[in-house]
């Protein structure tokens, strides 16, 4: 194997204080939200133009991904996806769903207008319906309309640090029934589906250098967000976990295709999955190594698997594949990680679909229905 164990991840860059502005990106239509309600927005005349300085991948990997259509991806390359875990459950209704969706997660190491254009182009090229973003580094929280994509984001009030977002395309936009802008490390969006609704949580976990208290608060907040999510929902928790779960198979939680040696953060993640009956999908499918690792050191010498797409064990059979897309490039040291799953989402007419921020009381009441 050409994989090398990584003992430490890159330390986060020093943050800087900035003033809280009306919009993280000039020229976009923005509506700002709070946990209690919705505020009016502003519109600027000009759309931001793409930055010419954003990197694109070159060489064989880029050409291979460009020349391969999404249909060929669905058909599968020579390394045909193979599940390593067989989790039983009440999944018969989902098996009959013929609609396939693509979900992804990407640590972009900050998002400027030019990089946002690149990310949206990659979503269109790969046909990604829902994309989670880590290390957004925007201030404030809100929703943002950008061309044919809609962005829900949450950051710190005044520091460009951490930050998460969920970007959805027009195919699934009108199926959204609410979102929870939890904090700068996690955000959730809920979609109306048939026969079950879908909840997607995007996270950005603390690095191995973080204090124990920060890690504890992260998992405490995530557990609370999980508990107010209706248990019948199809659930995905995606993002940069800054954890290595290792290559050893753990029945019901990980498959045979994890990478490296398990670390302390990985053990904590596995305990969280065990407690909540979750499975780490991108360890289940056999892939070439370039489609398993999610992070590369700046000098290219070290590779690791620290980003994960996690779902409830009972909905494991809805996931058709999970892998990275090395050809996608936005100038980050993380690879784009995607998974394809089957579900039927229900489009809600715009005239009768009021947007609302799902708060904890609403979610608890809805689960009780």
Image (cartoon, rainbow, N blue to C red):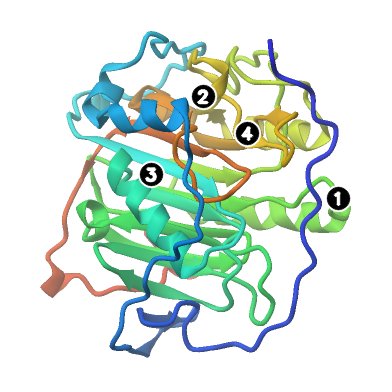
Q: Which x, y percent locates residue 208?
A: 82, 45
Q: Nearer the viewer, residue 353 or 20?
A: 20
Q: Secondary structure at mark 1?
A: loop
Separation (CA) of disc 4 from disc 1: 22 Å
Of badges 3 and 2, the one in the foreground is: 2
What residue do we see at 68% from left, 10% from top?
A: 1
According to the image, label 4 marks what residue?
273
- Mark nearer the N terminus (1 vs 2): 1
Separation (CA) of disc 4 from disc 2: 23 Å
According to the image, label 1 marks what residue?
209
Q: Is residue 274 visible?
A: yes
- Disc 4 + disc 3, Cβ < 8 Å: no
- Mark nearer the N terminus (1 vs 3): 1
- For residue 39, side relative to residue 57 (left or right): left
Q: Which x, y percent locates residue 146?
A: 32, 69
According to the image, label 3 marks what residue?
233
Separation (CA) of disc 3 from disc 2: 29 Å
- Disc 4 + disc 2, Cβ < 8 Å: no
What residue do we see at 54% from left, 69% from top?
A: 154
Q: Is residue 363 visible?
A: no
- Mark nearer the N terminus (4 vs 3): 3
Q: Badge 3: few (under 14), some or many (20 or more) residues near its Cα, within 10 Å?
A: many
Q: Is residue 33 above or below residue 57?
A: below
């Amino acid at each position: 194997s050409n994989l090398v164990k990584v003992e430490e991840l890159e330390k986060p860059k020093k943050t800087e204080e900035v003033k809280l502005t009306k919009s993280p990106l000039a020229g976009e239509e923005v509506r700002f939200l709070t946990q209690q309600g919705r505020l009016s927005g502003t519109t600027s005349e000009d759309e931001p133009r793409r930055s010419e300085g954003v990197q694109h991948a070159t060489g064989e990997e880029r050409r291979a991904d460009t020349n391969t259509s999404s249909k060929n991806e669905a058909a599968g390359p020579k390394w045909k996806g193979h599940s390593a875990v067989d989790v039983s459950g009440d999944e018969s209704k989902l098996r009959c769903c013929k609609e396939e969706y693509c979900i992804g997660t990407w640590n972009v190491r900050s998002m400027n207008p030019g990089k946002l254009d690149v990310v949206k182009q990659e979503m269109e090229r790969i046909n990604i319906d829902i994309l989670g973003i880590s290390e957004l580094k925007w201030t404030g929280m809100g929703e943002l309309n950008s061309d044919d994509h809609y962005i829900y984001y949450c950051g710190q009030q005044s520091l460009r640090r951490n930050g998460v977002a969920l970007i959805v395309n027009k195919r699934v936009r009108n199926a959204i029934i609410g979102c929870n802008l939890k904090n700068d490390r996690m955000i959730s969006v809920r979609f109306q589906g048939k026969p079950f609704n879908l909840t997607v949580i995007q996270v950005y976990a603390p690095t191995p250098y973080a204090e124990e208290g920060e890690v504890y608060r992260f998992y405490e907040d995530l557990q609370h967000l999980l508990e107010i999510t209706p248990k019948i929902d199809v659930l995905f928790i995606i993002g940069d976990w800054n954890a290595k779960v290792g290559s050893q198979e753990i029945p019901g939680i990980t498959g045979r295709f994890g990478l490296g040696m398990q670390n302390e953060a990985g053990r904590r993640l596995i305990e969280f999955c065990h407690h909540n009956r979750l499975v780490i999908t991108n360890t289940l499918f056999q892939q070439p190594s370039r489609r398993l690792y999610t992070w590369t050191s700046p000098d290219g010498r070290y590779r690791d698997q620290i980003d994960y797409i996690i779902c409830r064990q009972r909905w494991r059979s809805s996931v058709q594949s999970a892998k990275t897309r090395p050809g996608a490039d936005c100038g980050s040291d993380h690879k784009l990680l995607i998974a394809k799953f089957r579900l039927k989402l229900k489009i809600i007419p715009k005239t009768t679909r009021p947007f609302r921020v799902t708060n904890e009381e609403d979610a608890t009441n809805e689960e009780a229905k």
